[in-house]
Amino acid sequence: MTSQYFRKEVDGLTVFVRLTPKSAKDAVEGVETTDDGRAHLKVRVRAVPEDGKANAALIKLLAKWLDVAPRSITIVAGATSRLKQIRFEGDPGSLIAKLSGSIKL
């Protein structure tokens, strides 16, 4: 059994992301499960991991992908790591519905 790639919060969601910078394209590629059973949303961005450029590209991509305001997205853990925790502010039910409708499993 695998874990979920997000955690429901009182006023939003925390999504577990594995970011690959310096990719050929910006894309959300679906959910991957690592050998230890943890699940992550797999995301690629063209930006380089310097001066926060890859993180900014990640936030911009996720905002467009889920049709939410970029200001409602915060990186709460892993700012300098490939594995990140991204906080989405908003109605958890609505955000889960958007994730479910947008994700390729």
Image (tube, helix red, strand yellow):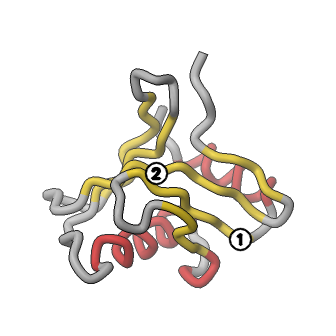
> Nearest the camera: 80 or 53?
80
- Is 12 on the left or on the right of 76, as rendered? right
Element type where label 1 sits in the image? strand
N-term-proximal mark, 2 vs 1: 2
> Nearest the camera: 68 or 75?
75
Residue at x 64% of width, y 78% of height: 72
Element type where label 2 sits in the image? strand
Residue at x 20% of width, y 60% of height: 25
Which quarter of the rendered picture does the N terminus lie within?
top right
Toward which corner of the image does residue 92 lie, by quadrant? bottom right
Report the residue marked by disc 1.
Answer: 89
In the image, residue 97 sits, relative to residue 36, either above or below, namely below
> Nearest the camera: 78 or 1?
78
Cα separation, mark 2 vs mark 1, equals 16 Å
Residue 99: image x %, image y %?
61, 50
Label annotation for residue 17:
2
Q: Amino acid at mark 1?
A: Glu
Residue 37: image x %, image y %?
51, 24
Toward which corner of the image does residue 53 lie, by quadrant? bottom left
- Count of picture labels: 2
In the image, residue 88 sits, relative to residue 69, either above or below, namely above
- Is 76 on the left or on the right of 89, as rendered? left
**Seen from this angle, which residue lies furthest top?**
1
Residue 60: image x %, image y %?
42, 75
Toward which corner of the image does residue 46 lie, by quadrant? bottom left
Q: Amino acid at mark 2?
A: Val
Residue 31: image x %, image y %?
46, 37
Q: Disc 2 vs disc 1: Cβ atoms closer than 8 Å?
A: no
Residue at x 14% of width, y 58% of height: 24
Residue at x 57% of width, y 67% of height: 76
